[in-house]
């Protein structure tokens, strides 16, 4: 039996399929851990995720991240985080973020400071024109 692939070149090559024995788990330390890299382009900017890499420890991950992601572009900060240490919520859990519609007072959109400032400036302008007349 030959390997069947989505790539027609592989199928045409007629490569024989190996025995379908179950894969054995790799031993510990047989492969490096995956690290996520975050990059800050300038002071005060938000760090952005720029990629991931494989490294045996945090120190080497930082060195490799600097070489890979900070060599060509301006960089003031770089962070590496073990991928296994990042927790996320899946899109199936989106109902966690639904807020109660009755608590609009918690939204920042309720504060119309700009309108108050404009009204105050108009009052001051009217008071100055009436006082000058």
Image (cartoon, rainbow, N blue to C red):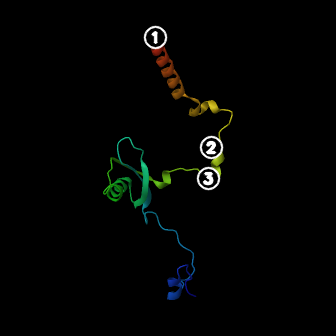
Q: Is residue 19 visible?
A: yes
**Quadrant (top left, top right, bottom left, bottom right) of the N terminus:** bottom right
Q: Which residue is mark 1?
A: 131
| Residue 131 point in image, percent of width and height | 46, 11
Asked whether 29 or 121 is in front, the reply is 121
Q: Earlier in the sequence, mark 1 or mark 2?
A: 2
Residue 100, given in percent of the width and then of the height, sits at 67, 37
Q: Nearer the viewer, mark 1 or mark 2?
A: 1
Is label 3 in a helix, a strand or a loop?
helix
Q: Is residue 42 above or below residue 22?
A: above
Sooner in the amino-acid sequence: mark 3 or mark 2: 3
| Name of the residue lying farthest toward the front | 133
User: What label sits on residue 91 in the rendered view?
Assistant: 3
* Residue 3 occupies quadrant: bottom right
Q: Earlier in the sequence, mark 3 or mark 1?
A: 3
Query: Which of the 4 image quarters holds residue 55?
Result: bottom left
Mark 1 and mark 3 in contact (Cβ < 8 Å)?
Answer: no
Q: Quadrant of the C terminus?
A: top left
Q: Is residue 17 above or below residue 63?
A: below
Is the residue marked by circle 1 packed among few (<14), some (14-19), or many (20+) residues within 10 Å? few
Tell me the residue that label 2 is attached to: 97
Q: Residue at x 50, y 88 (%)?
A: 13
Label count reads 3
Residue 56: x and y in percent read 39, 59
């Amino acid at each position: 039996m030959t390997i069947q692939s989505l790539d027609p070149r592989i199928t045409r090559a007629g490569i024989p399929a190996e025995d379908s024995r179950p894969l054995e788990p790799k031993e510990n330390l047989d492969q490096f851990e995956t690290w996520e890299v975050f990059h800050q382009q300038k002071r005060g900017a938000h760090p952005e995720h720029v990629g991931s890499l494989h490294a045996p420890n945090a120190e080497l991950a930082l060195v490799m991240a600097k070489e890979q992601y900070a060599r060509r572009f301006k960089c003031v900060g770089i962070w590496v985080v073990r991928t296994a240490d990042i927790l996320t919520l899946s899109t199936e859990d989106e109902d966690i973020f639904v807020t109660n519609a009755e608590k609009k007072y918690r939204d920042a959109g309720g504060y119309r400071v700009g309108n108050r400032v404009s009204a105050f400036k108009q009052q001051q302008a009217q008071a100055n024109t009436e006082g000058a007349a």
